[in-house]
Image: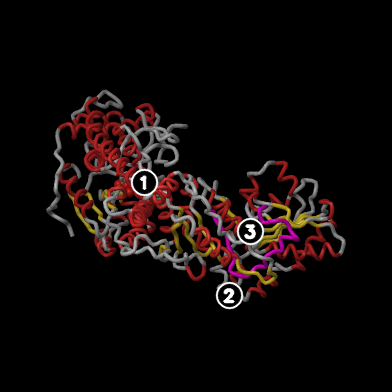
Amino acid sequence: MSALTYATPAIPEFSALDQACVNAIRTLAMDGVQKANSGHPGAPMGLAPVAYCLWNKILNYDPAAPLWPNRDRFVLSNGHASMLIYSLLHLAGVQGDGQRKPVTLEELKKFRQLGSVTPGHPEHHLTSGVETTTGPLGQGIANAVGMAIAQKWIAARYSKPGFESLFDHHIYVICGDGCLMEGVASEAASLAGHLKLGNLCLIYDDNSITIDGRTSLAFTEDVLGRFEAYGWNVLRETDANDLPRLAQAIESAKTTADRPTIIALKSIIAFGAPNKQDTKEAHGEPLGDEEIKLAKRFYGVPEDQKFFVPPDVYEHFAAGIGKRGAELHSAWDAKFAEYKGNFPDLALQLETMEKDELPVGWDKEIPTFPADAKGLATRDSSGKVLNAIAKNVPWVVGGSADLNPSTKTKLTFDGAGTFQSDSPGGRNIHFGVREHAMGAIMNGMALSKLRAYGSGFLIFSDYGRPAFRLASLSGIPVVYIFTHDSIGVGEDGPTHQPIEQLMSLRAIPGVIVIRPADANEVAEAYRVAMTSTHEPIVLAMTRQALPTLDRSKYATASGLQKGGYILADAPGGKPDVILIATGSEVTICVDAYEKLTAEGVKARVVSLPSWELFGKQSPEYRDTVLPPSITARVCVEMGAAFGWEKFAGPRGGIHAMHSYGESAPLKDLLKHFKFTVEAIYDAAKAQLTI
Ligand SMILES: Cc1ncc(C[n+]2csc(CCOP(=O)(O)OP(=O)(O)O)c2C)c(N)n1
Ligand SMILES: [Mg+2]
């Protein structure tokens, strides 16, 4: 298992100055945590040598241009060691990128303070050079797998003979025991092994300690054996302070192209702090002034200076990663200009992708669906619209967690292909039954500029929720297509019938949930999804067929763009009662409306496919759709009632689910749970008598 010798071409040389750089990382971390009076000093101290080696000797990264597309990616999956990445970003001189600010010495002193770019855990949207938001353990590993997939995909699609160097970056991740205990990491590592992602290198801080104490308390399996079984290249390193050896190990990982590599590093938490090293006390709390002095004495650096960086340390980083990165970047620019001359269309695609824009004509094939009483399931119209868009947006790449035939998300046009190790340009990804990793991998793909989508049953969105939350927090526009969106699932029964899922997704700040009522609302929902640049989108689709509404009779589906709109109205726009619904319940309301109207009752139907989009409209618009003076209302959704009070108001009724579903044919369920035209009609009439 362990590779004892490495055959690498050039082993970097190391000097006392290199050691000074390592110590600067350590002391900045100790001082930052101490000043904040909170945080984790131990991991950065143990990991400083390997992180230093990687950054200053190996990483192809231009600190002056943190968004350079072919940069090597660095992910700190054990985000609690955030002072490690902040110190590296600072010492390497990583600049702001136009949107996000750099980590200055002042920012290091503001570690964990309001408004700083050095929050408790690294946040992608705040800090220049932070490739992904980490902290919830395990996520970073799965993000990195997504980045590795993206690199392979972009290289396969865009590389041309003689231009391989434009697309050859690597993905490096540091993680700890905690990350490797988490299921999401196992899911992602399993897929990475299957896909033979040789561009991925995981450095495992195998320090045998977590917050509760030794890993012997709860983590005793053969971790590396597991990775071998996944098909990874496994290297074991025992001396976390042997700089040349660490560099060799990383170089060896880099040259192993046929599978991902894990380097297990036996490090010592809080190395150098005499009373705290190798103890759980090095975790989650500052070392204390006295212990910091002792550690600084051990490292041979000034004991009484805080946030001290010897000037030649900055210079050494500039001469290492700085010089290397600048040279590589300018060579890349020249090469890309040549590429652009030879392949202008491909270059334009890459530039459009980098800018988070869409190609001209991206929506030209989105269909309009004719009125049809029988209609089709929104999962089916979704599949058609997705394909129509993906055909014209070459970097739409995604798949499902083993439910392609059900979610209808397969890209079926010529040349779409399947992403596998021998076909890395394929656009259909088989994530396997791994919803959590799918979400986190999608985040990594999107951070590398692919328009990533993933799909499954709405009920299993629960399995991916931590990744959705991080997508939203960090502003990543991934698209989830969740089908089987209600008890309308039918015979599969309550284990497969979502109840609280819609509401719980709506509860994640920043996520836009859209539940279209018919095929034309589906088309509009995809327009919203594709033009989102910073918000994750959830599309909730039915398994069962829904009529395609006659838009010459009812309002046009473009109203979806506003989240909610008047679909059918009372004469003169003066209703006495409003029926409000989403998705499959909209047609039930339309039928109830027709019945009420035939009797002379003045009713209105509001289709409310997206609470979040509706919430973004002006109060005037919202009041036009739902006038506060009209308190007779019936809200209808085959999901949890929780939350609907917002639209029902103090007097309105809520027609929703108050229990789990049942296993039965759809028509029996609709009757049993009273999602019928008659029941809604009755509820509306009852409202008029209150
Ligand atoms: C999903 C998740 N659960 C719990 C935590 C809280 N937490 C932060 S660090 C940590 C222990 C991590 O141990 P390890 O990865 O070995 O880091 P080390 O102690 O070696 O630095 C825990 C449980 C978290 N950040 N994420
Ligand atoms: Mg540990």
What residue would you read off at disc 2? 491
Q: CA distance from mark 1 to mark 3?
A: 39 Å
Q: Which residue is mark 3?
A: 521
Mark 3–mark 2 Cα distance, whole angstroms, equals 27 Å
From the image, state whether disc 1 or disc 2 is nearer to you: 1
Q: Earlier in the sequence, mark 1 or mark 2?
A: 1
Instruction: Decide whether residue 257 is among the magenta residues.
Output: no
Q: Is residue 598 above or below residue 93?
A: below
Against 464, is 248 above or below?
above
In the image, 652: left or right of 81? Answer: right
Say if residue 175 shows up in the picture: no
SS under mark 2: loop
Residue identifier under label 1: 340
Label 1 with label 2: CB-CB less than 8 Å: no
Q: Quadrant of the N terminus?
A: bottom left
Type of the residue with mark 3? Glu
The kind of secondary structure element at disc 3 is helix
